[in-house]
Image (cartoon, grey):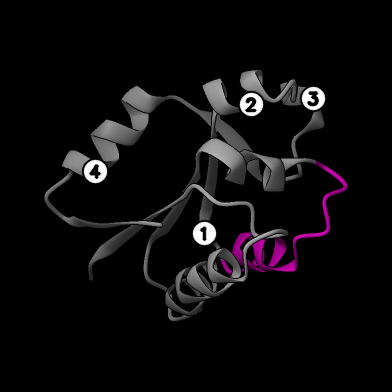
């Protein structure tokens, strides 16, 4: 079974395309594929506790791994204590390792 990596750079609260894109990740997670969603740039805003992002919560419930770029968090003044449940900080080095994994299909939006 393939592993999937979805890299999102747009805030799903502002960009309907981002919400639809993460919907694809959700469908794969519901089908029990290993799915990692890595939030970068403005998508880091969706990682905040209290942000109303239903697709983020559904991804977590479906078993997807949710990570957010620590640099994007720092640039937006979001501390680790403000992350939504189930969202982990990640580094660009970790993202590169995920992309380089030959068993992982990476998709960037």
Q: CA distance from mark 1 to mark 2?
A: 20 Å
What range is drawn magenta here? 49-62
Report if the CB atoms under discs 1 and 2 are less than 8 Å apart: no
Can you say whether 3 is above or below 29 in the image? above
Where's residue 34, x and y in %? Answer: 38, 62
Can you say whether 20 is above or below 69 in the image? below
**Horizontally, is 100 left or right of 14 in the view?**
left
Q: Quadrant of residue 60?
A: bottom right
Dot placed on the residue nearer the N-terminal end, 4 or 3? 3
Where's residue 47, x and y in %? Answer: 69, 43
Secondary structure of residue under mark 2: helix
- Label 3 sits on residue: 81
**Horizontally, is 100 left or right of 52 in the view?**
left
- Label 2 sits on residue: 73
Dot placed on the residue nearer the N-terminal end, 1 or 3? 1
Secondary structure of residue under mark 1: loop
- Label 4 sits on residue: 99
Task: Tell me, for residue 83, which label it has, or none.
Answer: none
**Horizontally, is 49 left or right of 13 in the view?**
right
Q: CA distance from mark 1 to mark 3?
A: 21 Å
Dot placed on the residue nearer the N-terminal end, 1 or 2? 1
- On whether residue 56 falls in the magenta region, the answer is yes
The residue shown at (42%, 75%) is 28
Where's residue 59, x and y in %? Answer: 60, 64
User: Which mark's residue is nearer the viewer, 1 or 2?
Assistant: 2
| Quadrant of the snapshot with the C terminus | bottom left
Q: CA distance from mark 4 to mark 3?
A: 27 Å
Dot placed on the residue nearer the N-terminal end, 4 or 1? 1
Secondary structure of residue under mark 3: helix
The residue shown at (55%, 64%) is 18
Farthest left residue? 102
Q: CA distance from mark 2 to mark 3?
A: 11 Å
């Amino acid at each position: 079974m393939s592993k999937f990596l979805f890299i999102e750079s747009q805030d799903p609260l502002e960009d309907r395309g981002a919400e639809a894109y993460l919907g694809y990740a959700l469908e794969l997670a519901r089908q029990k594929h290993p799915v990692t969603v890595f939030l970068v740039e403005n998508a880091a805003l969706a990682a905040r506790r209290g942000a109303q992002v239903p697709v983020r919560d559904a991804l977590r419930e479906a078993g997807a791994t949710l990570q957010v770029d620590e640099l994007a968090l720092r640039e937006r003044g979001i501390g680790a204590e403000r992350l939504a449940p189930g969202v982990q900080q990640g580094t660009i080095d970790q993202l590169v390792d995920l992309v380089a994994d030959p068993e992982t299909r990476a998709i960037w939006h």
